[in-house]
Amino acid sequence: MIGGTVKVHNVSKNFGTTQVLKDIKLEINAGEFFSLLGPSGCGKTTLLRIIAGFEIPTSGDILLDNESVINKAPNERHVNTIFQNYALFPHLTVFENVAFSLRLKKIDKNIIKSRVAEYVNLVRLQEHINKYPAQLSGGQRQRVSIARALINEPRVLLLDEPLSALDAKLRQDLLMELDRIHDIIGITFIYVTHDQEEAMSVSDRIAVMQEGNLLQVGTPFEIYESPADMFVADFIGASNNIEGKVIEVTENRAYIETPDIGRITVDLDKKLKASDHIKVTLRPEKIHISKKAPSLDSPKWNCISGKVDQMVYTGSHTRFIIKTEHGRVFKTFKQHAQYFTDEEPIQWEDNVYMWWHADDSFIVEVNGNR
């Protein structure tokens, strides 16, 4: 199969007086695994339904392979949709569910048998081909939905939170299956989810949405390491947000005076001048933590102290909530790389030092602007 391109051209959508999509501009490349990510009510499912043809935009256009499809019915577009509720026929076997659309097209029985076998094998359900949906697990039923959608050979596959009804372990397993299937067939996947980890683990690119607005489009690395604003920084993983005033700018770094942790150094990833007010994001895993004061050999290191307020052991790492003397809370992780040679473990209410390099923080806003 060959993946199609999708262009969302200035799409807005109103339901009555409520505007749920606001002038969305988006281009999705052929063969991409592309995710629409955001909290409930942000407009991502509405946008997917507009691409599918189930909703008509108030304004704007949808182009598939550079051809407008805004006036085409869903069955006239080279797309198929997978829903969260499977939508299988309970009285039909796996074989008959997958074969259903081909029978409607009156395709030769031998061709149907061959193609159904191919796609049932693709989703690894060949041993269950004669079972009914009620005899399958939730993950298996969703695999049937995937095979049924793919047998039509769409150029774009739309997935509307397809894993949300599954438990955490099964969800992760099926997500990896989706990634494997995408790699094999090569068509364009547009995946709607509110789960950041899902989007980050399989997507080529991600569009982050909030309240009908498109905030940022980029690779998982770009969105995580260089968020467009504080909403993106907070929504994509944990973050420590720092605000302050620029007091000095040198060739490659700036010194910031903050109200609750004193003076810190940041790298110049945005143009700054003295007296600018800025917001900085710092990921928890970038922060080192120890009961011993560190020996820092560069002015680009920042160091503050505090007391352990909370700690959660997860096996691979421990998550700490550290409270400074001025009441500021920091989140940090300590990886458990070695068992026997680890230093003395940090305990609840211990006094600790935290330090990070100026390069590991990211300037998100300057004087209220991105």
Image (cartoon, helix red, strand yellow):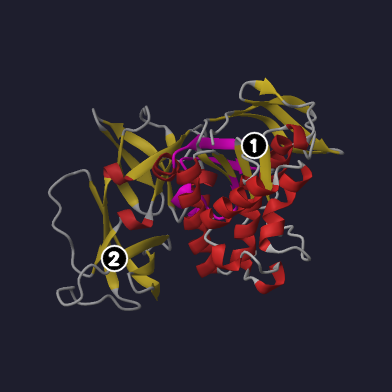
Report the amino acid beneath label 2.
Gln
Q: Label 2: state its secondary structure.
A: strand
Quadrant of the drawing holding the N terminus: top right
Q: Where is residue 123 in the image (x, y as percent from the top left)?
A: 54, 57
105 displayed left or right of 194:
right
> In which quadrant of the rendered view does residue 133 lie?
bottom right
Res 51 → quadrant: top right
Q: Foreground residue, 236 or 358?
A: 236
Q: Would you say the residues marked 2 and 1 are in contact, meaning their CB atoms lie under 8 Å apart?
A: no
Q: Is residue 360 left or right of residue 80?
A: left
Q: Earlier in the sequence, mark 2 or mark 1?
A: 1
Who's the residue at 71% across and 57% down the image? 97
The residue lying at 12 percent from left, 49 percent from top is 297
The question of residue 351 being in magenta is answered with no
In the depicted view, which residue is nearer to us: 366 or 192?
192
Image coordinates of residue 18 in percent, x first then y, are 81, 40
Q: Is residue 164 visible?
A: no
Counting other residues with Cα less than 10 Å from the Cα at mark 2, is it few (<14), some (14-19), or many (20 or more)?
some
The type of residue carrying mark 1 is: Asn
SS class of the residue under badge 1?
strand
Magenta residue check for 209 = yes
Q: Residue at x 60, y 48 (%)?
A: 115
Q: Mark 1 points at which residue?
A: 213
Examine the rendered structure and indicate whether residue 30 appears above or below residue 134.
Answer: above
Q: Give the residue drawn at x 15%, y 45%.
A: 298
Tell me the number on the disc at residue 199.
none
Magenta region, residue range:
191-219
Mark pair 2, 1: CA separation: 36 Å
Q: Can residue 136 be seen in this view?
A: yes
Q: Mark 2 points at which residue?
A: 335
